[in-house]
Image: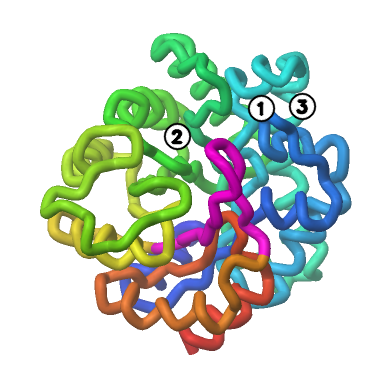
């Protein structure tokens, strides 16, 4: 079996799997620039040593899965930032940095899978045109495959139309796919305010998104990701009602500064974050890590909680 098949055998056996923490917010914290309309999309080119070291730190903590820092490297985002000409280079280099970090372990990390992370998010008022998003995503996933990605991780899927478009695209490149759904506002809210039918962040029911994703042969796992820690457990439980396959969680913790700005650093302590792990496991998650604001210290605490 190759490393991906070996990982999935462990997952299907119910073994706890540690996934990495944030790459974008962690790279920002270490000095990579935060772009107003593009998050940390250019960090693989501007600060490759930082990005590679972030991957290395998660590997040293025992992560079985690391994802490229490519949440904000879709062609639409790079176009909005004014650097669309870097599309191929930044996506290729971001995956290569994760692969290099794995290889630098002298064989210790050879079992670890590298995911090419792809989102359809946008940071301006210009929503991607679906036909263009499809074609660009096929190209992006192909670049990632050729750079050494073992799978494609769809990140922050927030509505049905873009989810379907993204799945149509990544299913064409011959790699397994993991799907990460996001619910609730950025800073979260009281879980008691969630309705019986939980909605995706930008519209449509989470249950419908799960049904769509389950219809694609390439999809091997589903996650609740980039979702407030307080909302993650009920969202996992909702997914588990409609999906019997591998399930995971990598939540975030955010604090609203104003209508358009959020703070992710120092919002939740590692111990506070890890305290959610048993509840996530009870809801069906066996693969656990973290998203924005969740760094190596949090992942170390998660590793301890997983045993």
Q: Percent from the top left, x then y, of residue 91? A: 69, 32
Report the disc number at residue 174: 2
* Residue drawn 33% across the image and 44% down it: 219
Give the mark toward the camera: 3 or 1: 1
Q: Which residue is mark 1?
A: 37
* Residue drawn 63% across the image and 53% down it: 263
* Residue drawn 53% across the image and 38% down it: 259
Q: Which residue is mark 3?
A: 89
Q: Is residue 111 left or right of residue 236?
A: right
Q: Is residue 17 left or right of residue 283?
A: right
> Which sits in the foreground, 265 or 298?
265
Q: Percent from the top left, x then y, of residue 10? A: 41, 72
**Distance between mark 2 and mark 3 Cα atoms:** 21 Å
What is the span of residues highlighted in magenta in the rendered image?
A: 249-265
Magenta residues, dominant SS class: strand
Residue 63, quarter of the rendered image: bottom right
Give the mark toward the camera: 2 or 3: 3
Q: Is residue 75 above or below residue 219?
A: above
Q: Residues within 10 Å of mark 2 (few under 14, many from 20)?
A: few
> Which sits in the foreground, 234 or 10?
234
Q: Percent from the top left, x then y, of residue 268? A: 57, 71
Are discs 3 and 1 less than 8 Å apart at CB?
no
Report the disc number at residue 136: none
**Distance between mark 3 and mark 1 Cα atoms:** 19 Å
Q: Secondary structure at mark 1?
A: loop
């Amino acid at each position: 079996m190759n490393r991906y098949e070996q990982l999935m055998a462990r997952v299907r056996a119910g073994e706890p799997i540690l996934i990495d923490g944030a790459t974008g917010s962690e790279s920002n914290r270490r000095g990579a620039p935060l772009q107003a309309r593009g998050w940390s999309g250019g960090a693989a080119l501007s600060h490759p040593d930082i990005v590679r070291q972030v991957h290395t730190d998660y590997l040293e903590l025992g992560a079985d899965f690391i994802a490229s820092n490519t949440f904000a490297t879709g062609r639409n985002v790079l176009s909005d930032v004014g650097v669309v000409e870097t599309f191929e280079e930044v996506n290729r280099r971001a995956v290569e940095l994760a692969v290099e970090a794995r290889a630098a372990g002298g064989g210790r990390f050879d079992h670890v899978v590298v995911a090419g992370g792809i989102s359809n998010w946008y940071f301006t008022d210009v929503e991607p045109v679906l036909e263009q998003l499809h074609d660009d995503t096929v190209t992006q996933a192909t670049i990632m495959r050729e750079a050494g990605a073992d799978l494609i991780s769809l990140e922050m899927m927030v509505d049905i139309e873009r989810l379907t478009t993204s799945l149509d695209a990544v299913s064409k490149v011959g790699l397994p796919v993991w799907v990460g759904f996001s619910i609730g506002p950025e800073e979260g809210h009281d879980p008691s305010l969630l309705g019986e039918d939980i909605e995706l962040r930008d519209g449509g029911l989470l249950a419908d998104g799960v049904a769509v994703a389950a219809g694609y042969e390439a999809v091997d796992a589903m996650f609740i990701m980039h979702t407030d820690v307080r909302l993650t457990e009920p969202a996992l439980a909702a997914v588990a009602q409609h999906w019997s396959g591998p399930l995971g969680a990598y939540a975030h913790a955010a604090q609203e500064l104003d209508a358009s700005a959020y703070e992710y650093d120092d919002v939740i302590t590692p111990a506070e974050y890890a305290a959610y792990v048993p509840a996530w496991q009870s809801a069906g998650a066996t693969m656990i890590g973290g998203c924005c604001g969740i760094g190596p210290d949090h992942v170390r605490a998660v590793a301890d909680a997983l045993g």
